Image: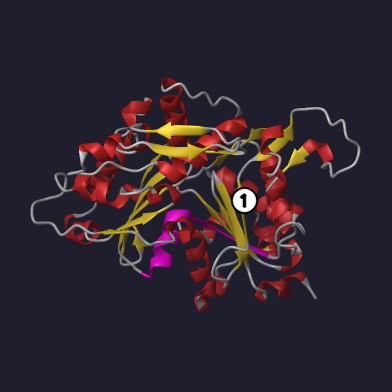
């Protein structure tokens, strides 16, 4: 079969998160594979000869999770930007391996997501790797917040997308992205984890290694919550026990909600942005007057950090005094919003007009990098 004929095959969708990779064939309900977006290098000498050892002492995915404490963890992406291309390429290769999808990259077009407002050079280098190294027959790249809106089935709203590395406020009206007023803040779940690590240190719990920071992340995801108006003071003082992998118990009190406060008050971690509510208000008020009413009434949450308990309620509390009087405010919280971008990409590939939007390998050879931007949604 000629390579161009593979374009009609089922696409592979890869959601490139700073903290979590999600990949699978378009059309299935959930990604076929999910794993953390880091690579592990063993930090101790092997003394037992038998057993599996990877090339270059590099671990990814499930193999890494079972040996995390033996490894130094490195993150190829920071705030949605690829900083170590060699490691990022190893992660992409792993997605196609037998340990994950077990598919031939030459036989399926690939749909890639990335954070909004990323450098053009990053998009071009991604395309270069998939076309020239993995020999994909066709490719498309789109921003994650826009795909979350596709997943919701709506055409108008402001996507509040908070992932591991980036907070994005993305206004869309009647299917048109209002690009001049997209706001991006390099603040997300990783900073929230690091803040919890600091709070725990003040309480006498020390987590210092890269693998221990992942334990703190898991603790944050299991126990953190946002304080809301009218919350019983006793609720804030409530102690929650978190059992560590070694069986010891961490007693979490105010740290559970204090770590989430940095999303609304970033100065706690030295960030000069306005907080998610302030950034949202700025985004909407910069849009044309005629558009604001519907934008205020369709605030769509996306990204894993927005799954923090009471996040939607707290955001609503925060924006009420910022919005005009008598404005109808509505925060939409899809239950599976951690996968919204991946699912939105699947929706987009299923639309009949999308067939002409693929950048084919032939177009790449003939026109080079400029074809990626010519066919981009933004």
Residue 358 position, x and y percent, is: 59, 67
> Is residue 109 rendered to the left or right of residue 189?
right
Q: Secondary structure at mark 1?
A: strand
Examine the rendering and report whether any part of residue 77 can be seen.
yes
Pointer 1 residue:
35
Report the front residue among 92 and 131: 92
> Is residue 84 rendered to the left or right of residue 20?
right
Residue 60 position, x and y percent, is: 70, 45
Q: Quadrant of the C terminus?
A: bottom left
Q: Residues within 10 Å of mark 1 (few under 14, many from 20)?
A: some
Residue 331 position, x and y percent, is: 27, 57
Residue 51 position, x and y percent, is: 86, 43
Q: Is residue 140 magenta?
A: yes
Give the total of numbered labels: 1
Q: State the image quarter where residue 302 is shown.
A: bottom left
Outermost left residue: 325
Outermost right residue: 49
Picture residue at 40% right of the left edge, 34% below the top: 252
Examine the rendering and report whether any part of residue 272 can be seen.
no
Find the magenta span and give its range. 138-153
> Is residue 315 rendered to the left or right of residue 64?
left
Picture residue at 74% right of the left edge, 68% below the top: 107
């Amino acid at each position: 079969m000629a390579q161009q004929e593979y374009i009609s095959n089922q696409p592979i969708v890869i959601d490139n998160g700073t903290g979590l990779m999600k990949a699978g064939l378009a059309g299935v309900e959930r990604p076929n594979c999910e794993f953390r977006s880091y690579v592990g290098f063993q930090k101790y000498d092997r003394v037992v000869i038998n057993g599996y050892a990877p090339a270059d002492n590099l671990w990814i995915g499930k193999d890494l999770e079972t040996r995390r404490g033996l490894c130094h963890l490195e993150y190829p992406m920071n705030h949605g930007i690829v900083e170590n291309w060699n490691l990022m390429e190893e992660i992409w290769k792993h997605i196609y391996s037998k340990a994950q999808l077990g598919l031939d990259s030459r036989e399926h077009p690939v749909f890639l997501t990335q954070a909004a407002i990323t450098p053009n050079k990053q998009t071009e280098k991604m395309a270069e790797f998939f076309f020239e190294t993995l020999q994909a027959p066709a490719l498309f790249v789109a921003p994650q917040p826009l795909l979350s809106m596709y997943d919701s089935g709506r055409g108008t709203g402001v996507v509040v997308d908070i992932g591991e590395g980036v907070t994005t406020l993305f206004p869309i009206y009647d299917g048109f992205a209002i690009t001049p007023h997209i706001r991006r803040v390099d603040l997300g779940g990783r900073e929230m984890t690091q803040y919890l690590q600091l709070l725990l240190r003040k309480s006498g719990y020390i987590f210092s290694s890269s693998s221990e920071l992942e334990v703190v992340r898991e603790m944050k995801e299991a126990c953190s919550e946002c304080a809301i108006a009218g919350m019983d003071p006793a609720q804030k003082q409530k102690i929650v026990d978190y059992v560590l992998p070694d069986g010891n118990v961490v007693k979490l009190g105010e740290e559970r909600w204090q770590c989430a406060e940095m999303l609304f008050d970033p100065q706690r971690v030295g960030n000069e942005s306005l907080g998610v509510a302030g950034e949202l208000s700025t985004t909407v008020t910069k849009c044309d007057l005629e558009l604001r009413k519907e934008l205020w009434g369709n605030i769509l949450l996306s990204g894993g950090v927005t799954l923090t308990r009471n996040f939607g309620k707290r955001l609503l509390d925060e924006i009420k005094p910022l919005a005009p009087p008598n404005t109808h405010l509505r925060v939409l919280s899809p239950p599976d919003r951690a996968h919204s971008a991946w699912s939105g990409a699947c929706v987009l590939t299923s639309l009949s007009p999308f067939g002409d939007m693929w950048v084919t390998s032939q177009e790449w050879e003939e026109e080079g990098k400029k074809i990626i931007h010519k066919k981009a949604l933004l």
